Image (tube, rainbow, N blue to C red):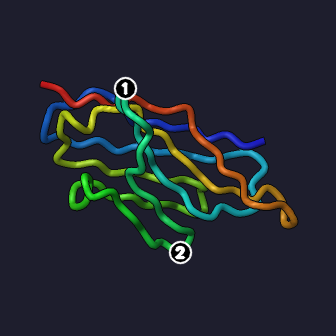
Amino acid sequence: QVQLVESGGGLVQPGGSLRLSCAASGSIFRINAMGWYRQAPGQERELVATITSGGSTNYADSVKGRFTISRDNAKNTVYLQMSSLKPEDTAVYYCNANIKHYIISPYDSHWGQGTQVTVSS
């Protein structure tokens, strides 16, 4: 099976920075797109940023210019550098990865357990 383990969340003041990490492990042949999503209380889960295996990125308008997604393919790890954080960035952040377990298997979508990010003074 596959596990996605996130780390790096916490409490930060407005204007501050945090770096999230998500490492995939287990039965992995290849990983296609990886990404970060977030869900605030009472809200639906929304896309924050995605990155392909080739490094192409996509960002939600609300985080453009403040967040940067990157990945280390050798480590099966995706990162989210968050800067100029605002109270409205407060949410549980989830990692997602599209993973091919074996050479003949299709890509399956996997989610991490989530990590809390709270932006407050």
Which callout, 1 or 2, points at the residue further toward the start of the chain?
A: 1
Residue type for callout 2 = Gly
Q: Is residue 11 above or below residue 8?
A: above
Q: Describe the element under mark 1 as helix, strand or loop.
A: loop
Q: Describe the element under mark 2 as helix, strand or loop.
A: loop
Image location (x, y in percent) of residue 104: 87, 65
Seen from the viewer's position, the closer of residues 21 and 48 is 48
Describe residue 104's horizontal placement relative to residue 40 as left or right.
right
Q: Which residue is mark 1?
A: 42
Describe residue 96's horizontal placement relative to residue 65 as left or right.
right
Q: Residue at x 23, y 43 (%)?
A: 17
Q: Is residue 85 above or below residue 75?
A: above
Q: Quadrant of residue 110?
A: top right
Circle 2 packing at 10 Å, graded few (<14), some (14-19), many (20+), is few
Q: Quadrant of residue 56?
A: bottom left
Image location (x, y in percent) of residue 4: 61, 41
* Nearest to viewer (mark 1 / mark 2): 1
Count up the numbered dots.
2
Seen from the viewer's position, the closer of residues 9 and 74 is 9
Screen quadrant of the N terminus: top right
Q: Which residue is mark 2?
A: 54
Describe residue 88's horizontal placement relative to residue 46 as left or right.
left
Q: Residue furthest right?
A: 104
